[in-house]
Amino acid sequence: MAKVRKAVIPAAGLGTRFLPATKSVPKEMLPIVDKPIILYIVEEAVRAGVEEIIIVAGRNKHGIEDFFDVSYELQDKLEKDGKTDLLEIILRIQSLATVLSIRQKQALGLGHAVLCAKPLVGNEPFAVLLGDEIMIADANAKTVTQQLAESYENTGKSTVAIMKVPNAEVVKYGIVDVKPINETTFAVQSVVEKPKVEDAPSQWALPGRYVFDAAIFDLLKNTRPGKNGEIQLTDAMTGLAQTKGLLASTFTSRRYDAGDKLGFLQANIELGLQHPEIGDGLRRYLLEYAQRL
Ligand code: G1P
């Protein structure tokens, strides 16, 4: 079965939930401790064996391209100052993967953003990772994208991640109608974008990690605007489920909703606590601060 070598990261959103911070800085560049969100996403994909990252960007997203490019002056200065540890961090980012970008010229929806990547993906399976969600796997555990890629490579079927959400939250997600295959794997029957709770087929939600067969592109091309007048990835997924088949899999990583202010702060605190440089200091501060609340 073909290997999943490419990953698409849609990054054309305006980041309105984080204004004014995102007025001139792409939301993907906001830091969780000392790394921008996009780096966590790229690292997850690379751990799954992805070699080529395709960023679907809008205007105002040069910061993302520059981040993965050579920074000659900075590198030169770090080298002359003997700051080899920092230099290594910078050089590692450039060599993680080949990073390509393509423009989504109009904000026509997530399905349209994924379709924009077709000229760079071609006719092979690919992963999609949404930057609003950060997934952290333990050091020796599989990343979500790795779990999905292995499912594709073993079965030849597109596979998407799912998680159970409370009824009050189904309206925030694509929700899948599934038939269980085993404890962690399900066959998707159809997908509904952000249903009202009374219309939701289940509480299984899509947290923004997918591995698709290239057949999704033809389905996306024929997908008419759906919920909110946008070309929805979830509508094309229903087409895929009913033709080539679509699997859904639970996952073991911890998930942070970094597209939300509270989730963003939680990610900063939890990952800050694990950071070798500041973890102990942050823990002491939080304990002391909690006394004052
Ligand atoms: C998008 C998708 C939705 C998915 C969600 C995950 O919605 O359309 O199906 O569940 O991402 O974050 P958005 O949050 O971009 O509105």
Image (cartoon, rainbow, N blue to C red):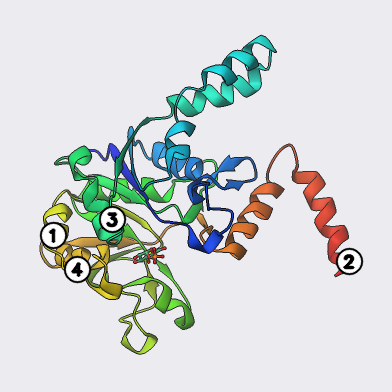
Residue furthest toward the bottom? 198
The amino acid on which the numbered mark 1 sits, given as a three-letter code, is: Leu
Q: Position of residue 128 (x, y in %)?
A: 32, 50
Disc nearer the start of the sequence (4/3): 3
C-alpha span from label 1 to label 3: 19 Å
Q: Nearer the viewer, residue 289 or 232?
A: 232
Residue at left offset 46%, top offset 74%: 165
Disc nearer the start of the sequence (1/2): 1
Q: Which label was assigned to residue 238?
A: 4
Please tell me whether residue 125 is drawn above or below residue 5 in the rendered image. below
Task: Classify mark 3: helix, strand or loop.
Answer: loop
Whether tag 3 and tag 2 are in contact, CB under 8 A, the answer is no
The reply to whether the residue tagged 4 has its Cβ within 8 angstroms of ligand 1 is no
Q: Is residue 28 left or right of residue 3?
A: right
Residue located beneath label 1 in the image: 219
The amino acid on which the numbered mark 3 sits, given as a three-letter code, is: Gln
Residue located beneath label 2 in the image: 291
Whether tag 1 and tag 3 are in contact, CB under 8 A, the answer is no
Q: Nearer the viewer, residue 277 or 47?
A: 277
Residue located beneath label 3 in the image: 106
The amino acid on which the numbered mark 2 sits, given as a three-letter code, is: Gln
The reply to whether the residue tagged 1 has its Cβ within 8 angstroms of ligand 1 is no
C-alpha span from label 4 to label 3: 24 Å
Residue at left offset 40%, top offset 56%: 13
Crowd tier of the residue under label 2, counting other residues whose Cα lies within 10 Å: few below 14, some 14–19, many 20 or above: few
Q: Is residue 2 visible?
A: no
Disc nearer the start of the sequence (1/3): 3
